[in-house]
Image (cartoon, rainbow, N blue to C red):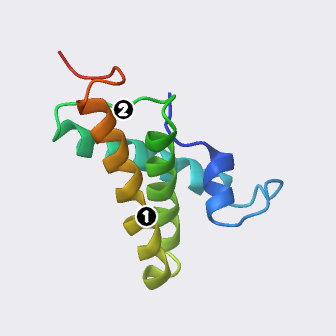
């Protein structure tokens, strides 16, 4: 299950929900974002949780970063910087044992 959703990414990018013109590209960005999040979490010996809001937001911001970097790299950097706050919040919570997801 993906961490990010198409609706979340569109909202971050301020794209209209009914606009389907970028759907395929956005879905590819979401897939890449999930892989990026998994790779980052692997470094902390933990795994993602599709139900966790911090994990979902971090992935959504990475998907927005990937999508935007193809159009406006300077503008895209804000999404990359923002994702770190959410990812660190997830990692801190996960490592402290408040939620499941640690690899055993």
Residue 22 in view here: yes
- Is residue 54 shown left or right of residue 85? right
Residue 42 on image: x %, y %: 20, 37
Q: Which residue is mark 2?
A: 48
Does residue 101 lie above or below 77 as drawn? Answer: above
Judging depth in this view, the residue of 63 and 50 nearest the camera is 50
Callout 1 crowding tier (Cα within 10 Å): few <14, some 14–19, many ≥20 = some
Judging depth in this view, the residue of 18 and 80 nearest the camera is 80
Please give the label number shown on residue 82: 1
Residue 59 on image: x %, y %: 45, 48
Mark 1 vs mark 2, CA separation in Å? 18 Å
Does residue 104 lie above or below 92 as drawn? Answer: above
Callout 2 crowding tier (Cα within 10 Å): few <14, some 14–19, many ≥20 = many
Q: In which quadrant will I find the C terminus?
A: top left
Residue 46 on image: x %, y %: 24, 30
Q: Which mark sits nearer the N-terminus, 1 or 2?
A: 2
Farthest residue to the right: give it.
18
At a point 33% along the width and 35% down the height, the residue shown is: 93
At a point 79% along the width and 61% down the height, the residue shown is: 16
């Amino acid at each position: 299950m993906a961490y990010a959703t198409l609706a979340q990414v569109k909202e971050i990018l301020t794209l209209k929900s009914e606009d389907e013109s970028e759907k395929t590209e956005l879905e590819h960005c979401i897939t890449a974002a999930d892989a990026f999040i998994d790779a980052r979490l692997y470094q902390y010996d933990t795994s993602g949780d599709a139900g966790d809001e911090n994990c979902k937001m971090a992935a959504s911001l990475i998907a927005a970063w990937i999508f935007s970097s193809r159009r406006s790299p300077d503008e895209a950097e804000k999404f990359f910087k923002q994702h770190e706050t959410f990812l660190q919040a997830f990692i801190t919570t996960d490592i402290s044992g408040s939620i499941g997801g640690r690899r055993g």
